[in-house]
Amino acid sequence: MKKRLGKLVGLLAVSLVLALPQLGILGAAADETGSWDVTNGSAAGTVLTAAGTDNDLSAVYSETLNLNDGISIQYDIKSFTLNEDVQGDADEMDNQMITFSFLSSENNGISLVVRPYRLQWGAKLNQRMMVAVYYTENGVTMNAPMWYFDTYLEVFDDTHTLSVQHSYGSFYVEGDGRIAPPYRPACDWDLSKTTLTVTMHSCKDAASVDIKSIAAEKTKIAEGEWLDMGPSEHIYQPDGSITYKNIDEQFTADVGSGNLWLHSHIGSVRGYDVTEKITLKVHYNLNGAGVWWGMYFANQAMLPLDQEKTSIDYTDNSQACKGIQFQNVTPFKAQTYYYKQEGETPTEEEAKQLKQYYPNGVSVAYGGEEMLNTIEIEIGETATKISFNGTLLWDDFRMTRDDFSAANGGDGKVYFIFEFIETPATPTRGIDMTIKGINVPEITSSTTLTRAKADTSDLVLDVDDPGNGALRLYDADRNEMDSSLYSYANGKFSIKAAAFADLAVNEDTPYNFFVGNDGGLDGFSVRIMNEVVALEPAVITPASYTLAQAGSATEDLVLSVDFKTGSFVSLVGGGLTRSQYTVTEPADGSTVGSIKLSKDFLNNLKDGTVTIRLTTQDLSGAQEVTEFTITVGDTSSSGGETPAGGGCRSALFASAGGAAAAILAAGAWLLRRKK
């Protein structure tokens, strides 16, 4: 893989500029029903065979195929000569190949060239397949592939898939779940009527391929606003974000001992106006130190990839990509990275400037919105300002609005790309990326709500609208709901009772909904109950406790707690740690439980008065705080902490604030509230 290795900087310049989509099938494949006209071979049903050495086969499919609406082919390779250990380089492989060529009457089209080969990594010999993508314009086919990739499936043991999809104004070509970037000059082609020709050449063995199905199949290439290299697992989080899980899995399964850098990419399909402030909310889980990631600003959704292939004309493609490398080691540092076809690089001074950034949830699986990182970008006329979680990294980042102008191949918008790299030393590390979105709405009131089944009033949310398209309401499956059910004005998102009319009473499980705009979703949940009971403060008995002398406790202190209509959230104060107390929740329909404070905690208290605060929470997310005081020794002159308003006090927390995990009395329900 000579052209895809080399120096790390070279890798960045050619591969950090790619976002490749994950296919999601929308329609079922149909059996192949057309017939084949075969030259120098035979067709037994759908099995195309060219027998003997150096025997070429050409098979033309009888049905016209519409690439504009999407097409998918499934095939098995029955027998074929494998290219021998040529390091997976499309330019070094000989002419042992299977070619699927789609050509219109205007002599425009797309060809996918499949080259099975053997690849030696140490003592392990792997079967591999290379898929190279060529475009034919006015009858002239590219001399070198526009793009090529390995498919990572076994040649003879797996069923392979080829697909061409037309989406976002471009043609996307897929082979076994790997996607090539679009060729922009082809965007305006009409490929609604193409002829499929399959050719094969095998030097030693009989070439035999079973075309199992050819189907008109429209698939989606994006999840939300993002494309990923795939195929990765997508987890749809209740807060509106999407987790792309194990996005490196297909590239690390059997690397062996090869000296190979492993890449994964995710990129936005929608551009964002460079004259407006842009806010991204993301979380990355690289599962350990030693792996870095990058965020790049491109002036097109897809970029040219390999500048070594100089025979390809990239003039209609994007010409600029600038970005940041984030080092995933402590202390966390970030530095600039620039890419341009002419070879622009950071200045020597810039390369030395490592900026300290402070990430949330490093190397930890996504667990909620508190783990998101907020990245703010303001692209100016002379420079760009970039902040990470409120910390200013640059106010002089060398990127301007002109980089995204038509003169530089752009459309006045910035497209974001994320890149991850890991090495053969960590082949099974696993990389996850969670994306909340760009300029998404934010629900600033409670996102955990309860509602009586008979309630006919509107449900009203406080929503901060960043102005990225109209606000919309979505159901649990992220389907947009009828616009007559909701409205937005003056920061209030009102939802009519009819939106919840068909929901059954379920006190155990809430229903998920989302408020979204063009950049992403923000989630909230509604629990439907027969009746909603207001939260009452807990009552602790006794309301206070006195320890005559510091260090004199001989046993644990057990307090009776009537949780009323709430459930336990937290217990803090006096340096109390989780190992120093035990909470017993109510059982058997009772509201009374207990809290036990260890004698070790009591004996560590100094003379004076400390206040312990018990927080409880109801199903709507509202919280109450009940205070309990402990007095140690003579406090008349100690200056110790004194309680405000007596031994037992309750304060209602506004339901719009705070974040807590509540262990509910009826079970282990986890409730999360937004800040």
Image (cartoon, rainbow, N blue to C red):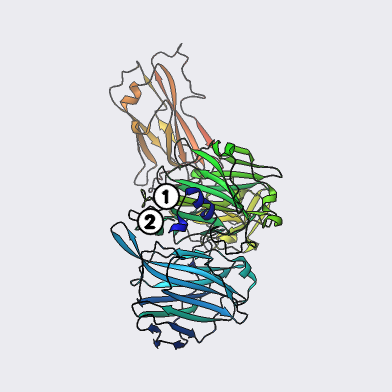
Q: Residues within 10 Å of mark 2 (few under 14, many from 20)?
A: many
Mark 2 in CB contact with mark 1 (< 8 angstroms) = yes
**In the picture, which quadrant includes the C terminus?**
top right
Question: In which quarter of the view is residue 309 placed?
Answer: bottom right
Q: Mark 1 belongs to which amino acid?
A: Glu
Q: Mark 2 belongs to which amino acid?
A: Thr
Indicate which disc residue 229 carries: none
Q: Is residue 235 left or right of residue 314?
A: left
- Identify which residue, 154 or 238, lies in the foreground: 154
Q: Is residue 623 above or below residue 12?
A: above
Tell me which residue sits at (42%, 49%) in the image: 422
Q: Is residue 556 left or right of residue 283?
A: left
Percent x, y for residue 612? Answer: 43, 28
- Identify which residue, 146 or 195, lies in the foreground: 146
Percent x, y for residue 529? Answer: 49, 54
- Identify which residue, 624 or 195, lies in the foreground: 195
Percent x, y for residue 271? Answer: 63, 56
The residue pinned by badge 2 equals: 252
The residue pinned by badge 1 equals: 422
